[in-house]
Image: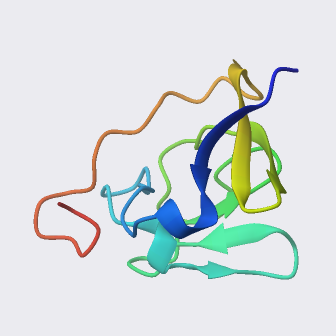
Amino acid sequence: MTFVVVANLDDLEVGDTTCTHQKQPLHEGTLQDDDTLVCAAHASRYDLVTGEAVGPFASGPIPVYACKIEDDGILVDIDQQLNDAPLPGPPAPGSLGAR
C-alpha cells in the first residue's frame, strides 16, 4: 500500500460524496453503529467496509479505499480501490451537495 496525503482535515469541503440512487449528497447522511452510512434523502444504506449497498433504493456499491489520518493529514491508498464499484458521477443538480 502506498498512502498519499490527499488533503488536510481543514481542507475538506462539503459535497464530495454521492449516493448511487439519485446522486444525492451522502455527507448529509448518518453513520450507524454497524458501520453503515444512511443517505439522508431516501434512506439508501451503504456498508463502509465493503461499499456494498445494503438497504433500499441504492442501485449499486460505492468505491472503497484504505485511508487513515496522521496528524492533520488525510492519507488514501489511491493505487488500489478495495472493491470494484464504479466511480459515481457528481451530485444531482439542485441537491444540497451540488456545486
Provide residue 36's location: percent of width, then percent of height: 75, 68
The reply, left or right, for residue 91 in relation to residue 38 is left
The answer to which image quadrant residue 60 occupies is top right
Name the one closer to the observer, 73 or 55: 73
Which image quadrant: the C terminus? bottom left
Colour scheme: rainbow
Residue 31, horizontal then vertical, whole percent: 70, 79
Q: Quarter-wise, where is residue 9 in the image?
A: bottom right
Instruction: Decide which of 65, 94 is in the foreground and name it.
Output: 65
Question: Residue lying farthest top?
Answer: 79
User: Foreground: 27 or 36?
Assistant: 27
Q: Where is residue 26 in the image (x, y as percent from the top left)?
A: 47, 67
Total labels: the figure holds 0
Q: Is residue 59 above or below residue 71?
A: above
- Position of residue 52 relative to residue 47, above or below, is above
Instruction: Reply above or below: 45 against 85.
Output: below
Residue furthest toward the left? Answer: 94
Task: Name the residue located 39 percent from the left edge and 70 percent from the top edge.
Answer: 14
| 53 on left or right of 19 | right
Viewport quadrant of the N terminus: top right
Residue 82 x %, y %: 77, 28
Residue at image point 73% right, 62% down? 72
Residue in the image at 71% along x and 53% along y: 73
Q: In the image shown, does 22 or 73 lie closer to the viewer?
A: 73
Residue at 73 percent across and 28 percent down: it is 83
* Left or right side of 25 for 86: right
